[in-house]
Image (cartoon, coloured by chain):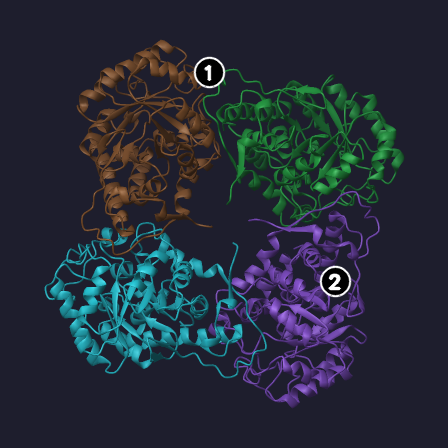
Chain colours: A purple, B cyan, C brown, D green
């Protein structure tokens, strides 16, 4: 079977992953409306392609928080990579470094931050944090990440409690006994998520700021009001995200929310987006609407499930080729030429 | 089979109820467009969830007409509960009391008001009235309900004649011989509904007022004009309802009509809504759009069909958990924080 | 099988008619988009039902061009009724008279006007005319109709040539040898339609006027411009029609065009509509949007196919009952209470 | 099997062509959204047909760049006609001449321009050019075409690189060894398309102008900005095209882009459109929205696949008959009567 586009990797993963793992990765909250809307919303955006603009030399590099990446697609934080591939997050780190892009490692990794760092020294990595009731544990994690050379701290804001994912409830999902949330001191029940602190507020950004010199990126923002609050509380970046549709069902698709957030932010901090990216042209749309970079979640897991590090590189390479081709066909030779004039919202 | 969400109860009821009972409960008028629209309309409403708002302590209680209930979901009046479970409305009353919420008992109950009261003393109950040609019979019912401690009188306004429910016609639906409309003096043909009085007008509100000190809630209002008339005629509450899509097909979905009614009422009386509630997040949407409380019809019957009183409690508990989680994920710690800013209508 | 709604008759006809006859009656032009839109457009109209308005005494009678009919549904002109039932248009005439409504007999009847008249003396009938190249033949037809007591002359304006109905081409549709277009002097090839005159213009209304004292109703108008021309040329009525979607595909649904035509006509002549009526509530919608009466085409043929005169009466009786019930549930006790306030166009 | 409409030819071609050839002709870029939208967008346009306008004498001729054609449908440039029929472009040329319309021969023909010319002397033909890195090769092609009597030069602007057509990648599509791109000096790999020059800009129009006295038509314009640039750079015509949805996926449907381009051009040059034409009424819609003529791509190939020259004539004749009938049913007796008043965009 030729791996031509990301759907091929999805089909492979659905076929070869254990059902309980596939279901966990695929899960959306409740009716999965938002999960699916993330994808559908891209289809409602139409390009306005420009012709005859000399696209013989293409430059698809960009920078996020000052660091150059080979193209504007990074790896979103997702948990439990060993469910997809034995080497887990170590493979993810290697693939991201090989493709010269950014990998956001999750608190819920099945490898330690130290293992991740050692697997791909020198790679550009950010660390994603869930704030726990035990604030000392969180502090320790942040400081370990900084010491290991992670270059950004991503605070997830949309998970005070875990969303209701029906299949996980039906499956009684939990990690197999041989996998551990290695970055957390004490083992705990994943599904109950009791260690997460639902009392976190905007003031906790100041607490985080006091722990680390790393730039803070807030993930899970969907409204102009929260975007404004994020800027005012001094974050360096915003990831527009609905957690892949796994938290509150029937919120906005992220590409729709991106427009609102970018407008509110007015360039004061960088804005990124995740959710629903399935083609290189989706990346082009997100950039045209103001994202500095996008992050992929499930497609990265499909790549891992296919062939580990190599499979994830395949996924990234396909996105890269598609992105470059879309840019050229839309008349842009470099990322700096991408702008809102390239797109319009379909009336349908 | 795990009962994870309300659809599970629906599937169970469809499988285990006698077809004629399932068809009767499921029936909508004509093409069932409005019945289905009630559900679809919720899906067109999108949340605008807010982050980092300290949702560690959740308070989901509310009050209707001054009485506290454990969460803003009551039991709508539906007929013939013995078709779903042998104990009929007695089980319904017990489940509602156990969950500390309000149960609106129907004129077409298969238990007497006395049996319902005795089954769950002290529960919060309203009585739903169809006005009959024999006004003395109606008067007697109202006064019995008041004497038994029912705390509200719900006048159904949308059934001057019974809607055309094709499956009921095909099935020749009628109650099995061992079930009776026990609250009505003389037995009569349910399907012909001849005892109902189609000459009822707004002035009959004054007649009802003269019979009882109970607050009067009018059920079946769908337009701003009728909402204004209801307020002017002195009702205490309005239930926006299209009778589950069983009366005039192709009227508005209730959640759409709610917006119009709430706007017209301008806070002068409480407004409730029924129809199409299938998830806790639907409750959150209804409250965001101005409903004080919602009422569930068919899902309550599915719960009864599953395990009687216990099954209905399961249904209510799932809604309660989902409602609490939706609130938290949308950034609301108490019902008073819910407002219109939480939602927007999808353009699609 | 119980005949509960019009779809039951459609299913029956599809099952029992010869395929070539079913295909002919069912046919739409090209992709059948307009044929299907006629029905779908009704579903996009929502009622705004009013409550508590004393609907104990219902009056569903109306008048068209001064003649009372039992309810605002007549029989549209369709050809070849013998394809549906041996007695053909004689049965149609009898059913229409029995139900006290108006039957528009087609030029392409398989019974003579004399047979139709004799079958149901005293029934309210209009005669539908296609203008032929042989104007003398048309003149003779008009004058025969007038002499036989037909009370209106319906000029079909939308068939200068026959639309392209793919199934008829594939089937090589033509009348069976034992059926004849008895009202036309010389037999001719139906599918070629060569005798029709495509040079007819608005001035020919004056020519028709000179032939007869009957009121002239023009059928096939879809735009405000043509509605204005019709009024100026002195017609007494307009039937908004797209010939059941059998002529130009992808024109407007008739219920949508009705709005435009009614607005242009401003009450100067009566406006009727055909196409897509499948339920009593469709009739109510059409009247709410300004139609004086609707006409049914295919449903009448399904009725004939079911049981001839009796089957057509069944169809009319169902529509009558549904119309009366819809009116009552919308809060109207008589046709004069129906108005635009009853409906709104769905945004979807 | 009767060949009644263009879909019949499509079904035939799908059944009888080798899969690899069918896939190549049918292919769209990525998800094929734009390919399919080209067709769907026509369905969202509604006619406003006018009645009683004397359509007894129909004149469907038009002129493009001063040359009369029998009706406003020409043959769009598509490659590799020998994949559809052994005689390839020679058959196409003969059919176009027989039907008295214009054929745009592709750079990627499997017959030489000389063979095409000799096959149908005197036919109206334009030559479609891809600019190659080897500019001398392009110059030679242009001058050969002019010398052979081609009467227009069509510059394709939307293919700096070849779009990603998944099926072609999966199939490893390439021409069979016995077919050649005979108009190109040196054989080369079709799929890599390396000879194409992605550095072409608007200034190259001046270079082309210096090579030939032929009118220059630019193909692939989708925005008002590019339409304005095309006019300013002195082209004689614009073909609104998205390459049949084979280049950038999720750009606009061509019939939607036509509106924008026609508005920008304000009559300064002729505007044509290709993509999605499947019925004569689509042609009428395109003309109503300002196109001077349309061009068909895939339907021409289906005609070839059916019966070569004869099959393509069948396709053209069906379109011609349907176009004439649509015009008549819309109330237009000649092409000059077609205008924007005939159409409206459906709100759905």
At numbered mark 2, what does the secondary structure look like: helix, strand or loop?
Answer: loop
Per the image, the residue denoted by label 1 is C199
The crowding category of the residue bearing disc 2, from other C-alpha atoms within 10 Å (few below 14, some 14 to 19, many at least 20), is many
In the rendered structure, find residue D184 and report the number of the disc placed on it: none
Per the image, the residue denoted by label 2 is A72
Q: Is residue A203 above or below residue A330?
A: below
User: How far apart are labels 1 and 2 at the CA level?
Assistant: 65 Å
The crowding category of the residue bearing disc 1, from other C-alpha atoms within 10 Å (few below 14, some 14 to 19, many at least 20), is some
Q: Is residue D278 above or below residue C334?
A: above
Foreground: disc 1 or disc 2: 1
Q: Is residue D109 left or right of residue C55?
A: right
Is residue D80 or residue A348 the one in the foreground?
A: A348
The structure residue drawn at horizontal position 11% and vertical position 66%, both measured from the top left corner, is: B185
At numbered mark 1, what does the secondary structure look like: helix, strand or loop?
Answer: loop
Q: Position of residue D112 (x, y in %)?
A: 78, 27
Q: Is residue D341 above or below residue B254?
A: above
């Amino acid at each position: 079977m030729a791996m031509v586009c990301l759907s091929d990797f999805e089909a492979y993963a659905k076929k070869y992953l254990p059902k309980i793992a596939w279901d966990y990765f695929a899960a959306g909250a409740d009716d999965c409306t938002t999960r699916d809307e993330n994808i559908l919303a891209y289809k409602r955006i139409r390009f306005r392609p420009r012709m005859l603009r000399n696209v013989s030399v293409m430059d698809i590099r960009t920078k996020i928080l000052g660091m150059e990446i080979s193209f504007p697609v990074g790896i979103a934080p997702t948990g439990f990579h060993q469910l997809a591939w034995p080497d887990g997050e170590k493979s993810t780190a290697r693939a991201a470094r090989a493709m010269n892009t950014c990998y956001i490692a999750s608190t819920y990794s099945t490898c330690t931050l130290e293992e991740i760092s050692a697997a791909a020294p020198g790679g550009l990595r950010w660390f994603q944090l869930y704030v726990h009731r035990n604030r000392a544990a969180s502090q320790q994690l942040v400081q370990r990440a900084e010491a290991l050379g992670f270059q950004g701290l991503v605070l997830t804001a949309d998970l005070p409690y875990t969303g209701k994912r029906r299949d996980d409830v039906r499956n009684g999902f939990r990690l197999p006994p041989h996998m551990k949330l290695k970055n957390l001191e004490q083992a705990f029940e994943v599904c109950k998520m009791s260690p997460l602190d639902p009392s976190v507020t905007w003031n906790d950004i100041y607490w985080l700021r006091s722990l680390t010199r790393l730039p803070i990126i807030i993930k899970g923002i969907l409204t102009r009001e929260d975007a404004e609050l994020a800027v005012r509380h001094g974050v360096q970046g915003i990831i527009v995200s609905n957690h892949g549709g796994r938290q509150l069902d029937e919120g906005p698709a992220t590409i729709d929310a991106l427009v609102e957030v970018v407008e509110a932010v007015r360039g004061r901090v960088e804005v990124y987006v995740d959710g629903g990216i399935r083609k290189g042209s989706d990346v082009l749309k997100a950039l045209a609407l103001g994202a500095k970079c996008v992050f992929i979640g499930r497609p990265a897991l499909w790549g891992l499930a296919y062939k580990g590090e190599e499979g994830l590189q395949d996924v990234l390479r396909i996105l890269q080729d598609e992105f470059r081709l879309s840019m050229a066909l839309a008349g842009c030779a470099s990322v700096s030429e991408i702008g809102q004039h390239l797109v319009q919202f379909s009336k349908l």
